[in-house]
Image (cartoon, rainbow, N blue to C red):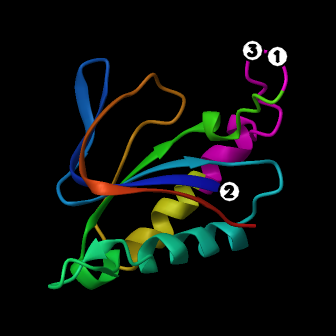
Amino acid sequence: MKALIQRVSEATVTVEGNVVGSIGKGLCVFVGVTHSDTRKIVEKMADKILHLRIFDDESSKMNLSTLDIQAEILIVSQFTLYGDTRKGRRPSWVASAPAEVAEPLIDDLIEVLRIEGINVETGLFRQYMNVQLTNDGPATLQIEVD
């Protein structure tokens, strides 16, 4: 499982002109699923997202986690994180799990995050989504767990 995590002051997902998910200060998390991902990997990813010290403390040092400040999270499924561009000019999606495998694992990730009391908003799986976000400083990280 891979995630691209962006610290934001706000983020919104729209589908066909309708807002389907919106957060204030928190993390916009694009999540990709591969064939070998399991519930155990989902739990590792949730733990990483919740405890990653990516928010500034009173000394402007990245020292606080999502749980520390009760930040919000916007989860957006993103199969393209597994795009392989090593050969040719068209990405290969072979490493990306099919929707039937990926969707339940994305749902599990959302559930695990919500159990911790965090407000989690989402995009819509298998939909063309427009994502608007406002970066909150230079804080974009790529995470992979297995």
Which of the labelled discs sits on residue 1, or is there none?
Answer: 2
Residue 50, position as x, y percentages in the image = 43, 75
Q: Do the residues labelled 1 and 2 touch (CB within 8 Å)?
A: no
Judged left or right of residue 82, residue 115 is: left
Range of residues picked out in magenta:
87-105
**Is there any visible trace of residue 117 in the rendered image?**
no
Residue 36, quarter of picture: bottom right
Q: In the displayed structure, would residue 140 be above or below residue 54?
A: above
User: Is residue 47 a member of the stretch shown in magenta?
Assistant: no
Which of the labelled discs sits on residue 36, or is there none?
Answer: none
Q: Mark 1 points at which residue?
A: 88
| Residue type at tag 2 | Met
Mark 3 lies on a secondary structure that is: loop
Q: In the displayed structure, would residue 64 be above or below residue 113?
A: below
| Residue type at tag 3 | Arg
Mark 1 lies on a secondary structure that is: loop
Q: Nearer the viewer, residue 25 or 55?
A: 55
Residue 55, position as x, y percentages in the image = 28, 73
Q: Name the residue under label 3.
A: 89
Q: Which of 63 and 108 is in front in this view?
A: 63
Q: How far apart are marks 3 and 1 (CA)?
A: 4 Å
Image quadrant in which the C terminus is located = bottom right
**Is there any visible trace of residue 108 in the rendered image?**
yes
Q: How far apart are marks 2 and 3 (CA)?
A: 24 Å
Instruction: Please name the residue shown 47% across and 66% down the image.
Output: 111
Judged left or right of residue 87, residue 83 is: left
Instruction: Please name the residue shown 70% across and 68% down the image.
Output: 41
Q: Do the residues labelled 3 and 1 touch (CB within 8 Å)?
A: yes
Judged left or right of residue 82, residue 10 is: left
1 or 2: tag closer to the N-terminus: 2
Q: In the displayed structure, would residue 121 be above or below residue 44?
A: above
